[in-house]
Image: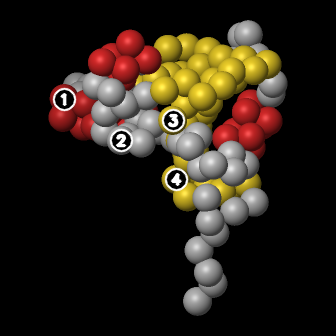
């Protein structure tokens, strides 16, 4: 007789896979890189949360690094469209109000901290 995994276990596996992200570091900046995620600008703007600061054609690395290097500190999220090689810098002062959506071909870079913690 084949043993079937409990439904709850499968649910946790699906949720875990859907929310997977990679922690990355660039200079004094740390950020989460999330595959197949983007910001739903329509919903986020309705909540008064998101403003597009700039957009440009560049690589994913340049996109995340230029958001980190924003001297005004306004770029809190970068969205990279892999197919078009296009980058969007977004100011999202209230991360709870910025609505993310799953969409293949996009990568979401969420700035966590612009300063590296001091070694203790």
Q: Which residue is mark 4?
A: 112
Q: How many marks?
A: 4
Q: Is residue 8 left or right of residue 106?
A: left
Would you place residue 47 above or below residue 114 in this image? Answer: above
Q: Mark 4 or 2, which is nearer the eye? A: 2
- The label shown at residue 61 is none
Q: Residue at x 52, y 53 (%)?
A: 112
Measured in 3D between alpha carbons, the distance from the residue under mark 2 to the one under mark 1, in whole angstroms, is 35 Å
- What colouring style does the render use? secondary structure
First in sequence: mark 4 vs mark 1:
1
Give the crowd class for mark 1: few <14, some 14-19, many >=20 residues within 10 Å: few
Q: Which residue is mark 1?
A: 7
The answer to whether residue 70 of the structure is visible from this angle is: yes
Q: Residue at x 60, y 28 (%)?
A: 53
Give the position of the N terminus as an image quadrant. Answer: top left
* Quadrant assignment, res 54: top right
C-alpha distance separating marks 3 and 1:
39 Å
The answer to the question of whether label 3 and label 4 lie on touching residues, with beta carbons closer than 8 A, is no
Q: Position of residue 55 (x, y in %)?
A: 68, 21
Q: Which residue is mark 2?
A: 94
Give the mark nearest the N terminus, 2 or 1.
1
Q: Residue at position x 28%, y 25% from top?
A: 47
Tag 3 residue: 91
């Amino acid at each position: 007789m084949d043993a079937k995994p409990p439904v709850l276990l499968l649910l946790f596996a699906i949720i875990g896979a859907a929310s997977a992200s990679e922690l990355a570091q660039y200079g004094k900046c740390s950020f989460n890189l999330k595959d197949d995620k983007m910001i739903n600008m329509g919903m986020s703007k309705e909540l008064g949360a998101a403003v597009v600061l700039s957009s440009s054609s560049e690589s994913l690395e340049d996109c995340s690094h230029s958001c980190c290097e924003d001297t005004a500190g306004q770029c809190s999220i970068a969205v990279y469209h892999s197919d078009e090689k296009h980058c969007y810098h977004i100011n999202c002062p209230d991360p709870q109000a910025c609505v993310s959506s799953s969409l293949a071909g996009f990568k979401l870079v969420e700035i966590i901290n612009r300063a590296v913690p001091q070694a203790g």
